[in-house]
Amino acid sequence: MNDFAAIDFETANENRCSVCSVGVVIVRGGKVVDTFYSLIHPEPEYYQWFCKQVHGLCEEDTDDAPVFPYVWEKIAPMIEGRRSWRTTAPSMKAA
């Protein structure tokens, strides 16, 4: 696959809608042609310890960041009409 968009979301807590950052990479002809990254003010607005350990982000990092709908307005045109891949991690439980 030579043309696609890869999207990586980080969340602040167990809610999938609590996006606190997003990264996008656009690939055409097998080469990276565009990238985008933004912090996002999560909704609901709290961070779980485990999530902070994974991505290193906390409340102070996203206090002044835009909420997801405003960031999505920038991402949507980038990925329109492209095959998109998103990354997710499987649920992890303490042993």
Image (cartoon, helix red, strand yellow):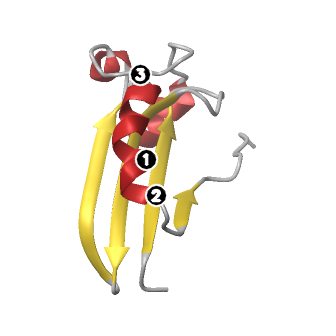
- Residue in front for this viewpoint, 69 or 86: 69
Q: Amino acid at mark 3?
A: Val
Return the residue at label 2: 80
Q: Residue at x 73, y 41 (%)?
A: 93
- In this picture, residue 38 sits left or right of residue 50: left
The span from disc 1 to disc 2 (Cα, nearest Å) is 6 Å
- In this picture, residue 37 sits left or right of residue 15: left
Q: Secondary structure at mark 2?
A: loop
Nearer mark to the viewer, of 3 and 1? 1
Report the number of numbered marks. 3
Q: Quadrant of residue 73?
A: top left
Nearer mark to the viewer, of 2 and 3? 2
Q: Is residue 30 visible?
A: yes
Q: Amino acid at mark 1?
A: Ala
Q: Position of residue 15 (x, y in %)?
A: 65, 27
- Residue in front for this viewpoint, 48 or 34: 34
Return the residue at label 3: 67
Q: Earlier in the sequence, mark 3 or mark 1?
A: 3
- State if disc 2 and disc 1 touch (CB < 8 Å): yes
Quarter the C terminus occupies: top right
Q: Position of residue 67 (x, y in %)?
A: 41, 22
Q: Residue at x 43, y 37 (%)?
A: 72
Q: Quadrant of residue 87?
A: bottom right
Q: Is residue 56 visible?
A: no
Q: Secondary structure at mark 1?
A: helix
Q: Position of residue 55 (x, y in %)?
A: 41, 40
Return the residue at label 1: 76
Q: Residue at x 45, y 72 (%)?
A: 4
